[in-house]
Amino acid sequence: MSAVLLDARGLEIGYGASVVVKGVDLAVGAGQIVCLIGANGAGKTTILRGVSGLLKIRAGSVTFDGETLTNRPAHVIARKKIAHVPEGRQIFAQMSVAENLLAGAYLERDAAEIERRREKALARFPRLKERLSQSAGLLSGGEQQMLAIARALMAGPKLLLLDEPSMGLAPLFVEEIFSIIKSLKDEGRTILLVEQNAHAALEIADHAYVLENGRIKLQGSGREMLEHDDISAAYLGG
Ligand code: ADP
């Protein structure tokens, strides 16, 4: 395995009185796509929220690039080049596409670097290039999801946390999203992906964790998980 970029040990995270992530260990190698699959409510989103600093980690630790990030504030974690794309196409609907992109680079001061990232993002998402001056709220669902990812890329992240990027999208967009995720890996980014679309996610995953009720039930390469009897029955409709 490549050098470990993100290392989470014994994670416990919850809401109010309920603990929903119950002692999870996970590692994401630099340059890998690692995916979390499991039934609704298993705790996948909660893990991403803990890693990105949106939720308190009650026990355990998160190390990123050799540095402890456990319970650092979200903006500090963002500065370390971890970008989180939450579920549900969270874009600034009243702002233009161009303004959304710029907002993603809010931590970067170097105008030339911002422009470089913008050019790169627009080359990757040509649909957005045609609609830069339009309100983001007028984009289709698939385009909004592309914009949410493009905005995260404007932060120049080493690690992208993607929560259900294909949720609710037309099949054509689903295919495009997975091909984009793969191309992000090919350019050296590291991705921690949460997906209900387990089959497509496992196809591109270097490693996968299967969560059940806040715990890791199984793990292995994407291929191993695709071929695992328990997985095909439970998650792939096989
Ligand atoms: P998954 O992403 O695997 O579907 P989640 O991490 O979203 O699972 O949810 C895990 C559990 O935490 C579920 O029981 C869910 O109801 C609960 N939960 C999620 N978000 C909240 C919240 N904001 N407040 C209280 N409970 C929550």
Image (cartoon, rainbow, N blue to C red):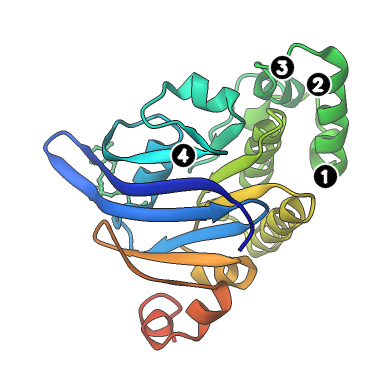
Tag 2 near tag 3, CB within 8 Å: yes
Identity of the amino acid at label 1?
Arg
Marks 1 and 4, Cα distance to the nearest angstrom?
A: 30 Å
Q: Nearer the viewer, residue 96 or 41?
A: 41
Q: Quadrant of the N terminus?
A: bottom right
Instruction: Give the foreground label among 2 and 4.
Output: 4
Tag 3 near tag 4, CB within 8 Å: no
Q: Residue at x 60, y 66 (%)?
A: 206
Check disc 2 and report the residue beneath it: 114
Q: Choose top left, top right, bottom left or bottom right for residue 182.
A: bottom right
- Residue 4 higher or lower than 67, as above or below: below
Identity of the amino acid at label 3?
Glu
Marks 2 and 4, Cα distance to the nearest angstrom?
A: 28 Å
Marks 1 and 3, Cα distance to the nearest angstrom?
A: 20 Å
For residue 108, the mark is 3
Check disc 1 and report the residue beneath it: 124
- Residue 99 higher or lower than 53, as above or below: above
Instruction: Give the foreground label among 3 and 4.
Output: 4
Marks 3 and 4, Cα distance to the nearest angstrom?
A: 23 Å
Marks 2 and 1, Cα distance to the nearest angstrom?
A: 15 Å
Give the percent coordinates (x, y) of residue 53: 41, 29
Check disc 4 and report the residue beneath it: 63
